[in-house]
Amino acid sequence: RGAAASALTGQAMVFMVWLAVMLGLAMGVVWRWRLVFGVLKHSTAAPDAVRQLVESCRQQLGIKQVIPIRCAAAIGSPAICGGLRPVILIPPALADHLDESEMRSVLLHELAHFKRGDLWVNHAQILLQLVYWYHPLLWLANAKIRQVREQAVDEMVLVEMRQEAEGYPATLLHVAKLGLERPMAAIGLMGILEPRRGLTQRIRHMVNRPLPRTARIGR
């Protein structure tokens, strides 16, 4: 009985530690999602020209659902958030600093995340990481998934931009330069610079490889 009670007590302690860490991480996620809701609440309507460009990009990608775009001063780079009702957010000054071709590539990037279902995959990654926070391989896998996801979306943008694709890496650098003062740090926002520290690798990947003919992912 003593050994069994001791084993049960040990298992209970392990469970309590797991539960405490999971709840702590979950509270962090909820807090950041509240930040996202606050950003949405204080966002404003995007300029008409940008909204028309979003519609053009949406039709180009064959997306049936209408996806609104709004301006949010709290973020440093374009991003998309939400699940059933996604919204694209851009910094207010972005439309003043990017030309039409650059803005088109940015919007194609955000819409590509929606078309690929990346928002739902990201939510699933967060949920799994909360439950299996103790497993280092899951953290490594999630980091790799985010890296490959951005490369896949970049390739989709390159395919859709066609003759203007060569200017896309420069657009990424331009957007990064504009957003240095307000780094985006809210879970739930999936942006063109997410993850920011991998930007150099993404640009090197695009520059050193020929332009892709298709954005389909093989096995």
Image: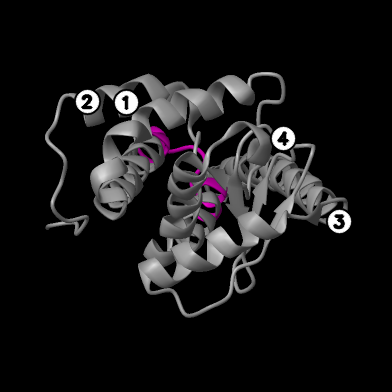
The residue nearer to you, when weighing 45 against 145, is 45
Spatial separation of the CA atoms under disc 3 and disc 2:
39 Å
The residue wearing badge 3 is 41
Q: Tell whether label 2 touches label 3 (CB within 8 Å).
A: no
- Local packing at callout 1 (Cα closer than 10 Å; few below 14, some 14-19, many 20+) is some
Q: Main secondary structure of the magenta part?
A: helix
The structure residue drawn at horizontal position 70% and vertical position 60%, both measured from the top left corner, is 48
Q: Is residue 87 visible?
A: no
In percent of width and height, residue 59 lies at 43, 72
Identify the mark nearer the N-term, 4 or 1.
4
- Mark drawn on residue 203: 1
In percent of width and height, residue 179 lies at 63, 26
Spatial separation of the CA atoms under disc 2 and disc 4:
28 Å
Spatial separation of the CA atoms under disc 1 and disc 3:
33 Å
Q: Tell whether label 1 touches label 4 (CB within 8 Å).
A: no
Q: Tell whether label 1 touches label 2 (CB within 8 Å).
A: yes
The structure residue drawn at horizontal position 50% and vertical position 33%, both measured from the top left corner, is 193
In percent of width and height, residue 19 lies at 66, 47
Identify the mark nearer the N-term, 3 or 2.
3
Q: Secondary structure at mark 2?
A: helix
The residue nearer to you, when weighing 87 against 17, is 87
In percent of width and height, residue 150 lies at 37, 42
What's drawn in magenta, residue-wise?
Answer: 127-140
Q: Secondary structure at mark 3?
A: helix
The structure residue drawn at horizontal position 81% and vertical position 50%, both measured from the top left corner, is 34
The residue wearing badge 4 is 93
Spatial separation of the CA atoms under disc 4 and disc 1:
24 Å
Q: Tell whether label 3 touches label 1 (CB within 8 Å).
A: no
Residue sitting at the far bottom: 64
The residue wearing badge 2 is 207
User: Is 22 left or right of 191, judged from the image as shown?
Assistant: right
